[in-house]
Image: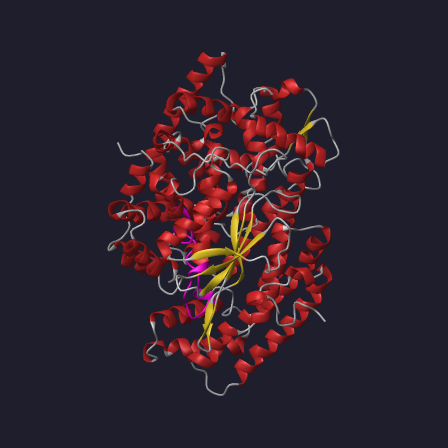
Amino acid sequence: MNPLLEKFNTPFETVPFHLIKPADFLPAVKEAILEAKKEIEAIKSEPIPDFENTIVALERTGDKLQRITSVFFNINSAETNDEIQALAREISPLLTAHSNDILLDEDLFTRIQLVFGEKAKLHLSEEQKTLLDKTYKAFVRNGAKLDLAKKARLREIDSKLSQLSLKFGENVLAETNKFELVIENKSDLKGLPEAIIEAAAQTAEEKGKTGKWVFTLAFPSYIPFMTYAENRDLRKQLFLAYNSKSCKGDELDNQQIILDMLRLKNERVNLLGYATYADFVLEERMAKSASAVMDFLHGLLERAKPKAKAEIDELSAFAKELDGLEQMEKWDFAFYAEKLKKKKYEVDNELLRPYFKLENVIEGVFTTAEKLYGIRFVENKAIPKYHPEVTTYEVLDTDGGHVGVFYADFFPRPGKRSGAWMTSYRGQKIINGIDQRPHISIICNFTKPTKTTPSLLTFNEVTTLFHEFGHALHGLLAKGNYESLSGTSVHWDFVELPSQIFENWCYEKECLDLFARHYESGEPIPVELIQKIKNSANFHMGYQTVKQISFGLLDMAYHGSDPNKITDIPTFENEVMKPTQLLPEVEGTLMSTSFSHIFQGGYASGYYSYKWAEVLDADAFELFLERGIFDRETARSFKENILSAGGSEHPSILFKRFRGRDPEPEALLKRAGLLN
C-alpha cells in the first residue's frame, strides 16, 4: 500500500508524513499521472464541449497528482537529502512532460477554443470568465498553436529547464551547507552578543567541534556576525564566502547553468512569438510591459539614490571618526550601520531582541489575525509533521468552524533551503457544494534557542514572520470555487500585497503591546522603545530601496534582452549593477549565481513586484491608519476584496473595490521618507 495514493486518514486529511517513505514518491507520481491522463481522455470524449464539461472538468483533473507533488516539492525545500534530490531529478521531467501532454493536446485545445469563442453568450460570473480566460491563455502561452516541430522543441526546452532549475538550487544549498567559519580564539568573538556566542558554541558542538565556535552562512548565524563582530578580517572572510556562492568555477558553479537557462527561456518565448522572456511574463502581470517596469524602477531610483548616497557618506564619516576607517567596504556596512543606528536612535537589535521571544511573537501574530479577521489558531499535536521542529495548528472561525490547517517551521537545518517562504499542501476550492479548506505552511530560518536562552528574534525577523504570515492569511482565508484562482493564485505583482501590508502592524504600539514582553521579566516593551522603533523605521531606507531596485534591474536585464549576447556573468552583472553601486565592487563575488528567486523560484521578470506591491501596501495601510489599525469594517473589506477573493478578478479591480480608487504611490514615498 502506497500512503500517497490512499485517502489520508488523518485529522482534516492532512499529509501522513509519518507513513511516507522517499521510495513511495516515484511510483505514486507515475500512477497519478496515468489517472490524470484518463481524466483528460474522459473530457475529450464528451460529445459537445461546454463550460462545465471542458473548462471546469479540466480544472478538476489531476487532483491526486497535485496532492502528491505538493508534498514532494515542499519536502525537497524544507527537509531534503541526497535521496530526495535524486528523486526530484527523476520526477521533474515526468511532470514537465505530463504538463506538456495536456497543454499541447490539439483535441483538448480545440474544445477549449470552441467554449472560449462562445464566451459572450455563456452568462458566466466574473470568476467563471476569469477561469475561462486563464485556461485559454495557458494553452496559447504554452504552445497550443505551434506546429508539430515547434511543439517538440518546446517539450525539449521545458524538460531541460526543469532540470537546470533543480541543479541551480541544489548547488546553492550545497554551498551554503559546506562553509564553516571555525573560531578557536575567544578574542575573535569580540563585539558579538553573548546569545550569539552561545549559539555558535552550540553549532560547534553539533558539528563535533566542542570548545570552539562555528559560524555558518545560515541567516541567524551570518547576519549577527556581520553586524557585531569587531574582527574586520573575519567579517571579510564570511562576507566573501556568502557572496561567492556557486561562482568558484568548481562542480557547484552556477554560471553556465544561468547562461543555459536564459538561452532556453529566450528560445522558448521566441517560438511563441515574443521578443524576450520579460515580454512573455509581463503580459500577464499588472505592470503589463518591460518598459512600464523599467520606468517604475528608474522612477524610484531617481528618488532613492540621492538619499542613499547621503546615507553612505554619513556612515563613512561616522566610521572614519569612530575607528579611522578610510574606505567603507561591503563587509563593513552592517557593522557600522548598527552602531550609527544606536547612536542616532538609541535602539539596536540586541536592545530589542529580549522583547521578541519567538513564542510570544507567534502569539502576537495569531492575536492580530483574530482581532482583524476573527480567526483563532489552536495547536493540534495529532496533525502529522515532517520534522519534530514543526508546529501544527487548526484554524477556527468565531463560531468554532474549521478554517484550515497551519504548519509553522522556524529554524535552519542542513536539509532546508535558506530564506523564508509560504507554501501549501492543499489549496482551497468548492466542489459539489463542499468547501475544501486549505493546508498552509510557513518556513523560516530564525535564531534558534540555546541551552540557556529561548529563541529571541531580531526586529527584522519579527517583520519577516509577519510578512510570511500575511501570505498564509491569503491562503487560509481563500473563498473561491476554483483552486487555480484561489488564495495566492493571483498576478505575481499582486501576491506580495497581503504579506507586505501585514508587516505594517509590527510598527504600531497597539499591536506591539499585544506580544512584545521581556522574556525574563514579562515587562511590556516600553513606550519610548516603541517610539524609537518607529523613529528608526526609515534608517537607511534610501540604501535599502536602491539595493532592492538593483535586484529588480538585474532580473530585468537578464530577461528583457537577448541572452545570446551575454558571454560572461561577472562582466554582465557588474555593468547592470553600476548605476545602483553605492560601495566598491568586491572581486570574486556575484549576486546572480545564488539569485534563487529568479533562477529557481518563480520571480524571473518579476522581482520588481516587491517594490510594486509596496506601493499597494503603503496605500492600503493608509486606510487602516485613518480608521484604526484594528478597525473591523476595514479589515472585513480587506478580507472580502483581497484575501478571500484570490485571483477571481483582475487585481486592479479588487484593489479599487477595497480602496475606493486606484493606488497612489505617494503613500510609499511618504512612508519611506523619499518625498522632498
18 relative position to 520: left or right: right
User: Residue 16: image x %, image y %?
Assistant: 64, 63
The quarter of the rendered structure image containing the C terminus is: top left
In the figure, residue 225 lies in which quadrant? top right
Where is 338 relative to 367, above or below?
A: above
Evaluate whether residue 294 shows in this view: no
Evaluate whether residue 160 shows in this view: yes
Q: Main secondary structure of the magenta part?
A: loop
Q: Nearer the viewer, residue 130 or 176?
A: 176
Q: Nearer the viewer, residue 389 or 258?
A: 389
The residues colored magenta run 476-500
User: Residue 408: image x %, image y %?
Assistant: 54, 51
Residue farthest along the right direction in this orientation: 208
Q: Nearer the viewer, residue 121 or 131?
A: 131
Where is 520 relative to 377, above or below?
A: above
User: Residue 303: image x %, image y %?
Assistant: 32, 34
Q: Can residue 607 be found in the magenta stretch?
A: no
User: Residue 128: image x %, image y %?
Assistant: 38, 72
Report the coloring of the rendering. Answer: secondary structure
The quarter of the rendered structure image containing the N terminus is: bottom right
Residue farthest along the bottom direction in this orientation: 47
Report the label total: 0
Q: Can residue 477 be found in the magenta stretch?
A: yes
301 relative position to 28: left or right: left
Image point 67% across, 57% down: which residue? 88
Image point 46% across, 47% down: which residue? 363
